Amino acid sequence: MMKEKESIDPFARYKETSSDKTILCMSWLRVEACKKYALLRIETGKWVFALSQLQKP
């Protein structure tokens, strides 16, 4: 049952597809920001684009 709940969470899904980039994300940003970052990355499909959006003040 726990595995099903993880599948519902888009961030958990992201961790499965790009674990290497998730580690980078976690070390750079807070957990909350990282979740939004992962969602941005999934929607846009552009890692650099999402990163630049978050770094802007």
Image (cartoon, rainbow, N blue to C red):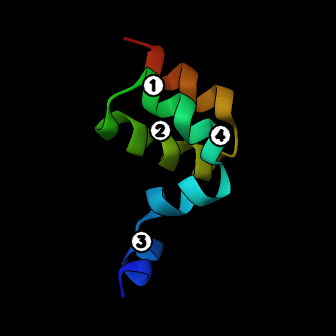
Pair 3/2: label in front: 3
Q: Which mark sits nearer the N-terminus, 3 or 2? A: 3
Q: Is residue 5 left or right of residue 19?
A: left
Amino acid found under the numbered disc labelled 4? Asp
- Quick one: SS at disc 1? helix
Residue 13, x across and y down, in percent:
54, 63
Amino acid found under the numbered disc labelled 3? Glu
Labels 4 and 2 touching (C-beta < 8 A): no
Residue 55, x across and y down, in percent:
46, 15
Q: Is residue 11 left or right of residue 13?
A: left
Q: Is residue 44 left or right of residue 33?
A: right
Tag of residue 6: 3
Residue 3 lies, with reference to residue 15, above or below; the image says: below
Pair 4/2: label in front: 4
Q: Which mark sits nearer the N-terminus, 4 or 3? A: 3
Q: Which residue is mark 2?
A: 37
Pair 1/2: label in front: 1
Q: CA distance from mark 1 to mark 2?
A: 13 Å
Q: Which mark sits nearer the N-terminus, 4 or 2? A: 4
Labels 3 and 2 touching (C-beta < 8 A): no
